[in-house]
Image: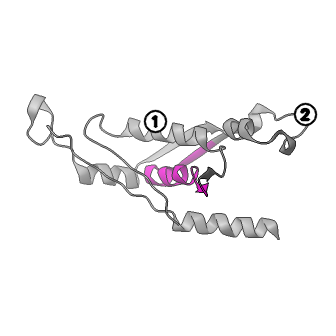
């Protein structure tokens, strides 16, 4: 029964997750100072919605932060902790936002810390290097 409740809770969290994307132009970009072209906000938003990426990450931060009494006495094989996620950039950002969920100010898990870091780096590599800011938030 506990597994069913957990599955339903996770499903509801995923369904109710929302992404707030804030795409702003660099202050000097619209004037063309320094030869910079204006940032195409619609193009960036479209790239986030339709672009896909693969993120390789590890669950090791969650294992390291876990209570030792929850772990097997033989330890955990590091190969079991390696994961790969594939999806749209916006979808990966949504999953990363859920990795930082807190209850009464305390993080629920640290297992997604590496996923969050690597997703942010992967999305940043797909966007223009100047004039773009992406903010992702989760609200129940």
Residue 9 sits in which quadrant? bottom right
- The answer to whether 94 is drawn above or below residue 63 in the figure is below
| Quadrant in which the N terminus appears | bottom right
Compute the Cα span from label 2 to label 1. Answer: 33 Å
Residue lying at 24% horizontally and 51% vertically, measured from the top left: 41
Q: Secondary structure at mark 2?
A: loop
Position of 122 with respect to 69 (left or right) is left
Position of 72 with respect to 58 (left or right) is right
Residue lying at 35% horizontally and 49% vertically, measured from the top left: 47
Residue 121's label in the rendered image is 1
* Contact, mark 2 vs mark 1 (Cβ under 8 Å): no
Sequence-wise first label, 2 or 1: 2
Residue at the right extreme, as displayed: 73
User: Relative to the observer, which residue lies in front, 52 or 78?
Assistant: 78
Residue lying at 14% horizontally and 37% vertically, measured from the top left: 28
Residue 38 place in picture, x, y as percent: 16, 42
Q: Dot 2: few (<14), some (14–19), or many (≥20) neighbours within 10 Å?
A: few
Which stretch is magenta? 84-104
Disc 2 marks which residue? 74
Residue 26 place in picture, x, y as percent: 20, 40
In the rendered image, residue 96 lying in the magenta stretch gets the answer yes
Residue 89 place in picture, x, y as percent: 44, 49
Residue at the top extreme, as displayed: 34
Position of 53 with respect to 38 (left or right) is right
In the rendered image, residue 61 lying in the magenta stretch gets the answer no
- The answer to whether 35 is drawn above or below residue 8 in the figure is above
């Amino acid at each position: 029964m506990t597994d069913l409740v957990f599955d339903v809770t996770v499903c509801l969290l995923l369904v109710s997750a929302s992404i707030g994307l804030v795409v702003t132009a660099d202050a000097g970009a619209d004037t063309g100072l320094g030869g910079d072209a204006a940032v195409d906000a619609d193009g960036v938003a479209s790239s986030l919605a339709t672009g896909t990426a693969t993120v390789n990450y590890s669950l090791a931060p969650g294992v390291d932060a876990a209570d030792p009494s929850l772990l097997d006495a033989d330890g955990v094989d590091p190969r079991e902790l390696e994961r790969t996620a594939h999806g749209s950039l916006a979808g990966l950002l949504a999953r990363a936002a859920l990795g930082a969920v807190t209850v009464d100010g305390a993080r629920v898990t640290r297992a997604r810390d590496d996923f969050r870091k690597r997703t942010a780096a992967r999305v940043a590599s797909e966007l223009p290097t100047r004039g773009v800011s992406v903010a992702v938030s989760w609200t129940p």
